[in-house]
Amino acid sequence: MSTTLNNPRRRSLIIAGTALATGPALFHIARAQAGAIRIGFPTPLTGPFSAEAQDQVRAAQLAVKEWNAAGGHKGQMAELIVRDTKLNPGEAATRTLELIEKDKVNFIVGSLSAATQLSINAITRERKVLFNSISQSDTINEAKEAGTYTFHEALNPHMTAGAVARYAFPKFGKKVVYLTADYAYGHEMVRGFQRAGEAFGMQTLADIRHPLGTADYSAFLPRIQALKPDILVLCNFGRDLVNSAKQATDFGIKQTTRIITPVLLYTARQAGGADAFEGIIGGTSYYWGLEDRIPSAKKFNDAFRAAYAGAVPSDYGALGYAGIKSVLQAVNDANATDSTAVAMALARLKYDWYKGPQFYRACDHQSVQSVIVVESKSKGMKDKNDVFNVLEVEAPNEANLRSCAELGFKA
């Protein structure tokens, strides 16, 4: 197992001076062994999603380490090659092409943006290389993006927003304002909330959009307050979510309005702090606190703690772990390392790596899985990691996905 870190132009993993450097063992550089199964891992190590990307790498490295320790594929080991997409679709495409043509990777796992994963998918589909995406997107499930080699390990916005809406909308009122990051992720989340809200008679007062990477939300908050919504939905991610939650709290929005968000990240909550996120409700693909009820969560958490000085994995970190584990399991199931055979095995996979049962739906290769609804807490915390109350676990259910026909697949 190794992470390639040679030419800076190639946007390799940069660890000096970042939160990523949790221990010397994590990024030990080893020479790639001959014949290693090489997995390219493009993710935005720099930019507003860097904390989440860094945790993805940690967990992905753990998955590779475990697989190698178990003997790999008939003694053939795996190697993870990380590249920085800079959260830019063009950069993501360039790095993916480089991974395929220069680094000769067998598979691609990664992405942390609805936009970058589509540019990655365009490259991998054209070159018939398996891609398992670990970022939220509705578009990647549609027939125009789908194919033999495209898999989606992450939740999608329709699933995530739908679960949060079904929990929150009946409880907090009918008038809603959306504060939306102006790119695919934000747009798709709003659509998911509005669609789920139809059953509850929800009224959209405004969908206020902001650029990705906005630092100052003061221009938006007076308008939101003047609209007097029952619910404010923060449809943004990473550092954008942290900044908007902090500033909405400081502005006093919570005095009259309940704040919810489709994806309430462990990393964002840690960065923003208890006061900024107090009482905010959101969805997540994983929370480490599930270990009390799900055996695979306890096993994953214990392995992560042992590898990283007692730290617990984040939600997006867990996606890095599962995205790699699924592909490597498919290598063993297929008894092969070519993308066609491995994709066929992956499509049949039923698995439980960290959160309970999952499987890939046949038409779009979407991972059908649970959605966890959590609330951020500021009191009664057992330790610094005990940041959420689990309010509901929505079980895996294909009925909560858009239908194959709606996505453009023909029967």
Image: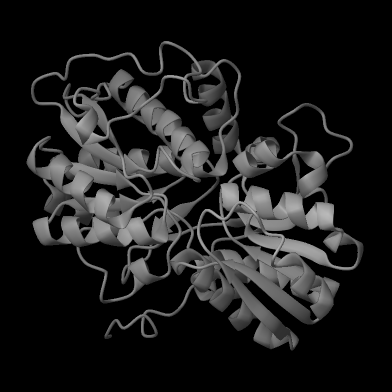
Q: Residue at x 18, y 15 (%)?
A: 31
Residue farthest to the front, as pictured: 219
**Residue 153's spot in the image, x, y percent?**
40, 53
Q: Nearer the viewer, residue 141 or 401?
A: 141
Asked if 181 appears above or below 69 in the picture, the reply is: below
Q: Residue at x 68, y 36 (%)?
A: 270
Residue farthest to the top, as pictured: 24
Q: Is residue 318 visible?
A: no
Asked if 370 appears above or below 158 in the picture, the reply is: above
Using residue 251 as the reference point, say whether residue 48 is left or right of it. Answer: left
Q: Residue at x 73, y 62 (%)?
A: 260
**Residue 148's spot in the image, x, y percent?**
19, 63
Q: Nearer the viewer, residue 363 or 113?
A: 113
Colouring scheme applied when the structure was drawn = one colour
**Residue 267's spot in the image, x, y percent?**
61, 39
Q: Is residue 322 visible?
A: yes
Asked if 320 appears above or below 94 in the picture, the reply is: above
**Residue 160's spot in the image, x, y percent?**
57, 63
Q: Nearer the viewer, residue 379 or 67?
A: 379
Question: Which quadrant would the N terminus be assigned to in this image?
Answer: top left
Q: Residue at x 38, y 33 (%)?
A: 60
Using residue 205 as the reference point, say whether residue 35 is left or right of it. Answer: left
Asked if 153 appears above or below 10 in the picture, the reply is: below
Using residue 146 as the reference point, say whether residue 134 is left or right of it. Answer: right
Question: Which quadrant would the C terminus be assigned to in this image?
Answer: bottom left
Q: Nearer the viewer, residue 59 or 95?
A: 95
Using residue 69 as the reference point, say whether residue 201 is left or right of it. Answer: right
Residue 16 is drawn in which quadrant?
top left
